[in-house]
């Protein structure tokens, strides 16, 4: 089998004050995509960096769904834009990639946090309008330019970075679930995991800007590179399937829609480890996720009940063949999700068969 890795055309790491210089080679007509609340923080900076170009700010609905992608693509065509300037988190990046793919427009991706590696990859995760996962679209290319602006990344809430860390942790564990633990790419993922264990306490306990920036870059560049080099078989499997399963309850339990993608992926890793009886690793990772505040976020949503766990487990097993290869069924996953105590920060007695 041929594995082709697709990477961004250009990656720029810079001070925020150098953003205008980073955009020197771009066209004269710009279509800006990004959430309103983030635009209120960084809008003046973005407009200043874009200078006298003809530009229009299209906003972003908050959901990477077909309706929003169609709206954005139509706007790009109407404005006759030379390039799209996308800022925000994973869903804004994914919607922008889809709009760029539909219009053939160049895409400049400027992630405003380390919450996902979406700004690096050639894929868009498509959701329903209520946040339920539908499918993943693959594009012919990544963003043309990925810009990591230091001050922008460092201004992000810690919750977004911690969610990105949980998402990035899945790279190593999904390699091991998929039988690729000894590969060179898995070694990269393992090294990244070690850096998270060392870095999270520093960020949690103090305003360690340097470490915050390092971890943010890891979540975007290193995670994206690992995904690209690992190929489709190792990009996302069990943990991500469970995360997508959780989103299926959002239409009827909207209070859980506030959970971030990485937080749901973190739950998927823990449940997978439990189902595979890798309890020592589970306990160690659970401590990291506790430091990241993930269980507090679950607890703030309300009661996690059997219906939620069964919905997530059934969807995951139906849509991810790796579970069948690992001989894990929906009942096993339901038990696992209940046993890892997602809404409790204390580890308690976690062992197989609880």
Image (cartoon, rainbow, N blue to C red):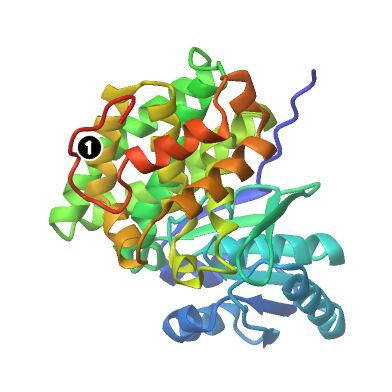
Q: Position of residue 276 (x, y in %)?
A: 43, 22
How many numbered marks are there? 1
Q: Nearer the viewer, residue 204 or 12?
A: 204
**Left or right placement of residue 121 versus residue 68 in this view:** left
Please give the name of the residue rendered at 42% of the width and 71% of the height, measured from the top-left corner: 17
Q: Position of residue 319 (x, y in %)?
A: 68, 39
Residue 229: quarter of image: top right
Please tell me how crowded label 1 is: few (under 14), some (14-19), or many (20+) other residues with Cα within 10 Å. few
Q: Nearer the viewer, residue 36 or 274?
A: 274
Q: Position of residue 57 (x, y in %)?
A: 65, 85
**Left or right placement of residue 106 versus residue 44 in this view:** right
Q: Position of residue 288 (x, y in %)?
A: 25, 41
Whether residue 169 is visible to the viewer of this picture, yes or no, is no
Please give the name of the residue rendered at 46% of the width and 41% of the height, measured from the top-left corner: 268
Q: Kindly give the residue lying farthest to the top in the view shown.
A: 182
Please give the name of the residue rendered at 62% of the width and 78% of the height, measured from the top-left corner: 60
Whether residue 262 is visible to the viewer of this picture, yes or no, is yes
Quadrant holding the C terminus: top left
**Left or right placement of residue 67 versus residue 299 in this view:** right
In the image, residue 8 above or below residue 107: above
In the image, residue 113 above or below residue 138: below
Q: Kindly give the residue lying farthest to the left in the view shown.
A: 205
- The residue tagged with tag 1: helix, strand or loop? helix
In the image, residue 275 above or below residue 48: above
Q: Nearer the viewer, residue 342 or 352?
A: 352
**Left or right placement of residue 15 versus residue 97 in this view:** left
Per the image, the residue denoted by label 1 is 198
Residue 59: quarter of image: bottom right
Quadrant holding the N terminus: top right
In the image, residue 178 above or below residue 104: above
């Amino acid at each position: 089998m041929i594995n082709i890795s697709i990477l961004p055309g250009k990656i720029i790491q810079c001070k925020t004050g150098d953003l205008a210089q980073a955009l020197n080679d771009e066209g004269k007509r710009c279509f800006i995509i990004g959430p309103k609340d983030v635009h209120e923080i960084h809008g003046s900076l973005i407009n200043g960096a874009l200078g006298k170009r003809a530009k229009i700010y299209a906003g972003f609905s908050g959901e990477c769904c077909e309706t929003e992608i169609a709206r954005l693509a139509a706007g790009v065509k109407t404005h006759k834009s030379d390039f799209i300037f996308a800022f925000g988190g994973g869903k804004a990046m994914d919607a922008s990639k889809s709009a760029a793919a539909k219009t053939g427009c160049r895409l400049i991706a400027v992630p405003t946090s380390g919450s996902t590696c979406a700004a690096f990859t050639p894929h868009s995760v498509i959701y329903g309008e209520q946040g339920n996962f539908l499918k993943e679209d693959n594009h012919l290319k990544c963003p043309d330019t990925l810009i990591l602006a230091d001050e922008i990344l460092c201004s992000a809430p810690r919750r977004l970075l911690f969610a990105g860390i949980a998402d990035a942790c899945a790279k190593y564990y999904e390699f091991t679930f998929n039988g690729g633990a000894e590969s060179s790419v898995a070694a990269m993922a393992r090294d990244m995991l070690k850096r998270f264990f060392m870095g999270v306490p520093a960020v949690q306990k103090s305003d360690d800007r340097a470490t915050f920036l390092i971890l943010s870059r890891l979540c975007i560049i290193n995670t994206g590179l690992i995904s690209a080099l690992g190929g489709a078989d190792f990009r996302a499997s069990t943990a991500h399937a469970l995360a997508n399963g959780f989103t299926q309850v959002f239409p009827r339990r909207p209070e859980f829609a506030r959970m971030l993608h990485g937080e749901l992926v973190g739950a998927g890793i823990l449940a997978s480890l439990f189902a595979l009886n890798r309890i020592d690793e589970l306990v160690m990772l659970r401590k990291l996720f506790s430091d990241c505040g993930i269980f507090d976020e679950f607890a703030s949503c309300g009661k996690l009940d059997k219906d939620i766990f069964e919905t997530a487990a059934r969807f995951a097993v139906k849509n991810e063949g790796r579970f069948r290869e690992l001989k894990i069924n929906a009942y096993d996953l339901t038990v696992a999700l209940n046993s890892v105590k997602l809404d409790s920060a204390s580890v308690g007695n976690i062992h197989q068969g609880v």
